[in-house]
Amino acid sequence: MVAALLDAGTPARQQCADGQPLVSLAAGPAGVQLVDLLAARGADLDARNRMGNTPLIIASAQGRRDVVETLLRHGADPDLRGDQRRTALMAAAAAGRIEVVRGLVAAGVRTGTRDEEGRTAETIARARGHTEIAEHLEQSRDGGILSGF
């Protein structure tokens, strides 16, 4: 459906009727294909929804590793902040998405960034009981061996 709209002349940077950027739909079922299509048509992959979150932050929180990897490959900025000044890494850590956290760290995101309450992704993970994520982030902070996407 999005391809048909784009073929009919709808700009890739167009917003949906509810004000969300088209690219924010990438966290849905058609994620990877939609990101590829919109990136090829010049969409802003860092467009924000009404909450201020980018598609990368949304996909990270939802554990959409495939979409996160695709957004990064197309140049999405992993260090942008969204709601509560949280990054994609913080969103993944808060949601317990270890594979996404590993991939983001391996992609070189900043691990020491703090949200509006002064918390890092590591402290957010610990507070939520995501010990494996907190330990991974602690190890990466100390220069440990990482595996990602």
Image: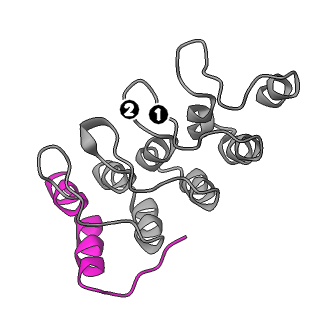
When the figure is inspected, residue 30 is found, relative to residue 107, above or below; the finding is above
- Disc 2 versus disc 1: distance between alpha carbons? 5 Å
Q: Is residue 141 magenta?
A: yes
Q: Under tag 2, what secondary structure?
A: loop
Disc number for residue 52: 2
Q: Residue at x 46, y 40 (%)?
A: 54
Q: Which of the pair 19/102 is nearer the observer?
A: 19
130 shown above or below 52: below
Q: Amino acid at mark 1?
A: Arg
- Horizontal side of 113 relative to 74 (left or right) equals left
Counting other residues with Cα less than 10 Å from the Cα at mark 1, is it few (<14), some (14-19), or many (20 or more)?
many
Q: Is residue 130 visible?
A: no
Q: Magenta stretch containing residue 95, yes or no?
A: no
Task: Give coordinates of residue 14: x percent, y percent.
Answer: 65, 24
- State if disc 1 and disc 2 touch (CB < 8 Å): yes
Disc ID at residue 64 = none
Q: Position of residue 133 (x, y in %)?
A: 29, 66
Q: Predominant secondary structure in magenta?
A: helix
Callout 1 secondary element:
loop
The image quadrant of residue 65 is: bottom right
In the image: residue 48, left or right of residue 87: right
Q: Which residues fall within the magenta stretch?
A: 121-149
Judged left or right of residue 127, residue 62 is right
The disc placed on residue 48 is 1
Going by the numbered disc 2, the residue's amino acid type is Gly
Could you tell me which residue is drawn at 48 percent across and 54 percent down?
77
Q: Position of residue 104 (x, y in %)?
A: 44, 64
Question: Could you tell me residue 97's position as x and y percent?
Answer: 39, 56
Image quadrant in which the C terminus is located: bottom right
Between 149 and 113, the one nearer to me in the picture: 113
Q: Is residue 53 visible?
A: yes
* Above or below for 110 versus 44: below
